[in-house]
Image (tube, rainbow, N blue to C red):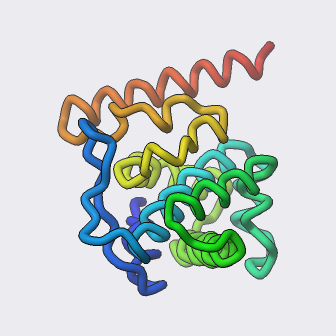
């Protein structure tokens, strides 16, 4: 059910092509550091935040059913909204207000694309975003410290930016353990 939301958003909104983050240096290989940085920071930030938001039934249901014209940025990022927008603005050297507007546009486009894929249930929304998470992590600049903001240390882990069969297996295995840990914590 993979849509490649990252690439679709980038193309549909006319952003420059995103660059993968080098797992060894933590740096992106951008040809120049200007408008590329806004897309480089904002798109993966929004996709990973949407992934986290839809782990709960309520968030996934809102993505599936709520009016797309709502303000999604504060809903998806919650208490971390202002700091996340500030981090992206600082990384991209963009005004905070313009960054917030662009991130809202990206959120709405992501939700539009998810709905265009005809999810029938909350679980379909969760599955779509779970399939996108590892791809988005490959492009997320570590300087944004999104994992700290979302209380998820696996987001900023360098191993999530590695590709290949062993890394894919390890990421999948980590996902299984984090889900079982979450289930165990919910039972308590």
- The reply, left or right, for residue 120 in relation to residue 139 is right
Furthest toward the top, the residue is 188
Q: Is residue 188 above or below residue 24?
A: above
Which residue does the image show at 34% across and 67% down from the upper left?
A: 18
- The reply, left or right, for residue 181 in relation to residue 92 is right
Quarter of the image for the N terminus: give it.
bottom left
User: Does any portion of residue 66 appear in the rendered image?
Assistant: yes
User: Does any portion of residue 115 appear in the rendered image?
Assistant: no
Q: Is residue 132 above or below residue 174?
A: below
Q: Is residue 93 above or below residue 148?
A: below
Q: Position of residue 37 (x, y in %)?
A: 43, 67
- The reply, left or right, for residue 36 in relation to residue 38 is left
Quarter of the image for the C terminus: give it.
top right
- Given residues 63 and 26, the one toward you in this image is 26
Which residue does the image show at 53% across and 67% down from the upper left?
A: 93
Q: Position of residue 56 (x, y in %)?
A: 72, 43
Determine the image quadrant of residue 125: bottom right
Q: Position of residue 41 (x, y in %)?
A: 48, 60
Which residue does the image show at 57% across and 72% down from the upper left?
A: 94
């Amino acid at each position: 059910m993979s849509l490649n939301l990252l690439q679709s958003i980038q193309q549909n909104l006319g952003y420059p092509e995103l660059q993968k983050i080098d797992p060894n240096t933590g740096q992106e290989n951008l040809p120049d550091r200007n408008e590329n940085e806004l897309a480089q920071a904002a798109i993966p930030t929004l996709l990973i935040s949407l992934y986290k938001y839809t782990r709960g039934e309520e968030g996934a249901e809102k993505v599936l059913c709520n009016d797309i014209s709502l303000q999604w940025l504060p809903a998806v990022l919650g208490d971390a909204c202002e700091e996340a927008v500030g981090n992206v603005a600082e990384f991209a050297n963009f005004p905070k207000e313009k960054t917030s507007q662009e991130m809202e546009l990206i959120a709405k486009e992501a939700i539009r694309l998810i709905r265009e894929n005809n999810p029938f249930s909350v679980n379909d929304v969760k599955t779509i975003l779970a399939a996108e998470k590892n791809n988005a992590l490959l492009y997320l600049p570590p300087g944004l410290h999104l994992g700290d903001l979302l209380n998820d240390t696996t987001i900023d882990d360098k191993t999530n930016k590695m590709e290949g069969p062993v890394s894919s297996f390890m990421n999948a295995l980590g996902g299984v353990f984090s889900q079982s840990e979450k289930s165990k914590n919910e039972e308590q």
